[in-house]
Image (cartoon, grey):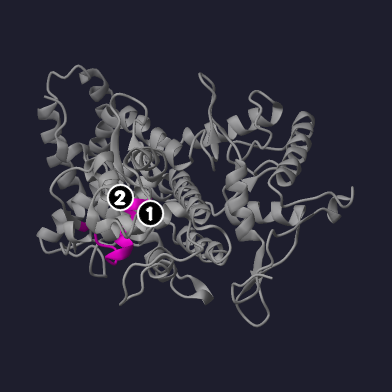
């Protein structure tokens, strides 16, 4: 018969809201805009049917009542432009292609998505909850700043939709399109009860919020479409780092250990597969991805402890002193000796039911080997469920991490050649985003302003702030002391890093002296966010 769904349920929002699948950041951002507009809640959008390219083009080129919004748009040109520049598609260019929705260049574009083809698999909720729980420091609430950028800058609270001169043509078209169909769409907040869990990695949430505030300091002079591309890369980068850290942190917590606060990722900057630095980056990626099985087991342990806590609650026993969802740290206390009797009874009940459902299963021998380990019934139950599902979840977790790290795409932190091995990389677009953030420094009178950085200072920021290593090996996480051959690879990687800085326009050679090599901002931003 196999395992029942109640045994195999894996997702636990106290660890992550994400249902680990192959994600697309355009769809994640689209769904995030919906939550941003409704204070974290999803939206109920009512339309008569799925939208097609013809629907969009018709609104822009045919309907008489919309001519003032789309003056000079002919049907064929409009259709081609819409399909190539304004629409996010699933399986683009293939016979199975479907429209997911409009590109998320403007807040209300989520109203014109085809929800079943624009799934975010919970990444939008995870992103929103990280930002909601984090403090944005001196510059106010991060979510408010994002709302102002995506909505208020273009749509006054009491006024009509407007486009300004500094908004690119694609965004202006999307604003007008949303205005044109506003009477055909019903958009209401979904008021069903939601559970809000505190982040398991609160420092990562704060870092994300701070990075968003810093990046938005540049919003007045970076083109809007570029800034949104930056935000997508930044969101993906932080979601990827967060879940990589979970692979290491959660197993440590479930084992009763104090998780390490340091973590390290070695990045190949040169971009040449099989080079010495690429092989180091392969080792780094392999070390982190190899932690997935332990993470699967730990997630099942926490999930089953949550089931146990609900069982205790029905019997009138409180597990956590606080109201609302039980944090992971409180659930892990249920592994203590004071809960042994209740836990054993619960584990015996669950294990008995599981063994009945898997009787005469083709994995009976594997189950028997786990039972023969002599573990308590609760732990045996968790181990059997993990053995059944670990390969399944490893596949989807790998795909999800690849997607969050933008594998082989602009802004990537991971690359994998065809039939090759994964390696951590530092794509030029990701480097641009991190530079825009790092070049801002606190001003004496408050606020932030841009300042030059030495190359070695920026490398230290990458290590200390994100755990990204370029010119040295991480202390741990698959590495020990650097060998002589490693030092050669590290020097080559540093040279490639400086060359990459030069390519993207943030660095020019003024001196051969290492400590005199400086990174210069493209724009000088004052404390009030203006440029000069």
Q: Is residue 329 visible?
A: no
Image coords of residue 264 (percent x, y)? 59, 45
- Residue found at x 30% / y 64%: 37
- Residue found at x 54% / y 54%: 261
Image coords of residue 149 (percent x, y)? 44, 65
The magenta stretch spans residue 521: no
Direction from residue 337 to residue 471 in the image, left or right = right
Front one among 348 and 500: 500
- Residue found at x 41% / y 48%: 250
**Quadrant of the image occupied by residue 382:** top left
The mark found on residue 173 in the picture is 1
* SS under mark 2: helix
Residue that protrudes farthest toward the right in the picture = 512
Residue 135 higher or lower than 120, as above or below = below
* SS under mark 1: helix
Q: Residues within 10 Å of mark 1 (few under 14, many from 20)?
A: some
> What range is drawn magenta here?
29-43
Residue 190 higher or lower than 364, as above or below = below
Please identify the dominant SS of the magenta region.
helix
Q: Residues within 10 Å of mark 2 (few under 14, many from 20)?
A: many
The label nearer to you, 1 versus 2, is 2
Which image quarter holds the N terminus? top left
Residue under pointer 2: 60
**Quadrant of the image occupied by residue 93:** top left
Mark 1–mark 2 CB contact (< 8 Å): yes
Of labels 1 and 2, earlier in sequence is 2
**Quadrant of the image occupied by residue 414:** top right
Image coords of residue 238 (percent x, y)? 48, 51
Which image quarter holds the C terminus? bottom right
Q: Is residue 366 visible?
A: yes
Residue 228 higher or lower than 379, as above or below = below
């Amino acid at each position: 018969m196999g395992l029942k769904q109640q045994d195999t349920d894996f997702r636990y929002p106290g660890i992550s809201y994400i249902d680990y699948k192959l994600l697309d950041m355009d769809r994640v951002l689209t769904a995030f805009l919906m939550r941003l507009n409704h204070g974290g809640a999803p939206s109920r959008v009512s339309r008569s049917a799925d939208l097609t390219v013809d629907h969009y083009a018709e609104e822009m080129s045919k309907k008489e009542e919309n001519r003032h919004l789309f003056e000079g748009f002919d049907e064929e040109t409009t259709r081609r432009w819409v399909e190539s520049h304004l629409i996010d598609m699933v399986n683009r260019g293939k016979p199975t292609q479907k429209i997911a929705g409009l590109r998320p260049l403007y807040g209300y574009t989520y109203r014109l998505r085809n929800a079943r083809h624009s799934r975010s698999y919970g990444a939008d909720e995870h992103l929103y909850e990280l930002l909601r729980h984090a403090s944005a420091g001196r510059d106010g609430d991060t979510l408010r700043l994002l709302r102002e950028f995506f909505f208020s800058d273009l749509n006054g609270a009491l006024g009509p939709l407007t486009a300004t001169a500094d908004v690119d043509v694609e965004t202006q078209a999307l604003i007008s399109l949303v205005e044109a169909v506003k009477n055909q769409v019903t958009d209401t907040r979904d008021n069903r009860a939601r559970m809000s869990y505190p982040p398991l990695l609160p420092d990562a949430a704060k870092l994300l919020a701070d990075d968003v505030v810093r990046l938005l300091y540049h919003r007045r002079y970076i083109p809007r479409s570029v800034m949104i591309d930056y935000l997508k890369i930044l969101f993906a980068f932080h979601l990827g780092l967060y879940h990589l850290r979970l692979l290491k942190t959660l197993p440590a917590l479930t084992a009763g250990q104090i998780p390490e606060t340091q973590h390290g990722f070695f990045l190949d900057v040169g971009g040449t597969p099989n080079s010495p630095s690429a092989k180091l980056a392969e080792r780094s990626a392999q070390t982190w991805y190899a932690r997935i099985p332990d993470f699967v087991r730990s997630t099942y342990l926490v999930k089953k402890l949550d089931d146990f806590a609900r069982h205790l609650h029905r019997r009138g026993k409180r597990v956590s002193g606080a109201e609302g969802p039980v944090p992971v740290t409180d659930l892990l206390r249920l592994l203590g000796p004071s809960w042994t009797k209740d836990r054993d009874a619960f584990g015996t009940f669950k294990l008995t039911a599981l063994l009945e459902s898997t009787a005469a299963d083709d994995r009976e021998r594997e189950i028997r080997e786990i039972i023969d380990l002599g573990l308590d019934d609760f732990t045996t139950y968790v181990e059997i469920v993990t053995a059944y599902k670990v390969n399944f979840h490893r596949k989807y977790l790998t795909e999800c991490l690849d997607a969050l790290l933008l594998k082989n795409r602009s802004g990537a932190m991971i690359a994998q050649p065809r039939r090759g091995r994964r390696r951590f990389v530092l794509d030029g677009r990701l480097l641009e985003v991190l530079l825009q953030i790092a070049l801002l420094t606190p001003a004496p009178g408050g606020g932030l302003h841009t300042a030059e950085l030495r190359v070695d200072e920026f490398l230290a920021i990458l290590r200390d702030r994100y755990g990204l290593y370029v010119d040295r090996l991480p202390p741990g996480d698959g590495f020990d002391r650097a060998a002589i051959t490693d030092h050669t690879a590290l020097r080559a990687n540093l040279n490639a890093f400086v060359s990459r800085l030069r390519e993207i326009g943030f660095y020019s050679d003024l001196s051969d002296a290492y400590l005199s090599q400086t990174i210069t901002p493209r724009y000088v931003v004052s404390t009030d966010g203006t440029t000069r």
